[in-house]
Image (cartoon, grey):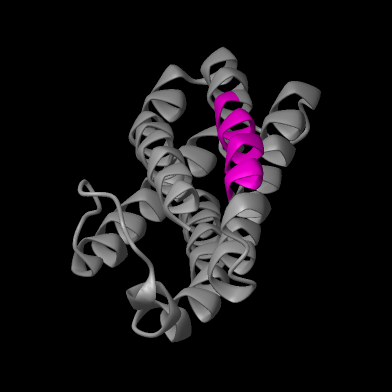
Amino acid sequence: MKSQNIIKLIVALAVSLLAGAIGGLFVNPALNTWYMTLAKPSFTPPNGLFVPVWVILYILMGVAAYLIWKEGASNKMIKNALLIFLFQLVASAFWSIIFFGSHAVGLAFMEIISLWCAILATILSFYEIKSLAAYLMILYILWMTFMAILNYGLWRLL
């Protein structure tokens, strides 16, 4: 692997994991306090499952972004795909801020629907450039589908 590609991979992984870390700043304090007090749907996974799943998903997102970026950043379609990707990363962190930071479960549900659309847009834009990058995002959209259902279930139980 060329050194410039190694740098791109490291940057793509770092940016993705940074989005997760920013969200984690709001998740961690609320997870064992406020979140524990909520009535939860029967299908709520154990708290210990969330961190490993998110780490894997952010790594897959970083690899997907890298695969697109290494195709060349001067191409307008690639630039747009990476901008959509960055937008959905910001939206992902923003959901954590709304849900865990503000405890606004209903607003978080509305935001997660927007996030889901942004993920879909990312997948579609990645697919046009490199299908493997799009496929790496499939687990993420599946997880976010489940998270949207869980978010809605939590909201209904409030």
Q: Is residue 56 left or right of residue 107?
A: left
In the depicted structure, whether residue 44 falls above or below residue 36: above
Q: Quadrant of residue 60?
A: top left
Q: Residue at x 60, y 57 (%)?
A: 95
Q: Position of residue 134 (x, y in %)?
A: 46, 25
Q: Position of residue 20 (x, y in %)?
A: 49, 65
Q: Is residue 103 left or right of residue 10?
A: right
* Range of magenta residues: 109-120
Res. 61 in view: yes
Q: Nearer the viewer, residue 37 or 70?
A: 37
Q: Position of residue 66 (x, y in %)?
A: 51, 43
Res. 85 in view: no
Question: So how many labels did they put on this image?
Answer: 0
Chief SS of the magenta region: helix
In the depicted structure, whether residue 25 falls above or below residue 62: below
Q: Position of residue 108 (x, y in %)?
A: 61, 53
Q: Residue furthest top?
A: 128
Q: Residue at x 34, y 61 (%)?
A: 55
Q: Quadrant of residue 119?
A: top right
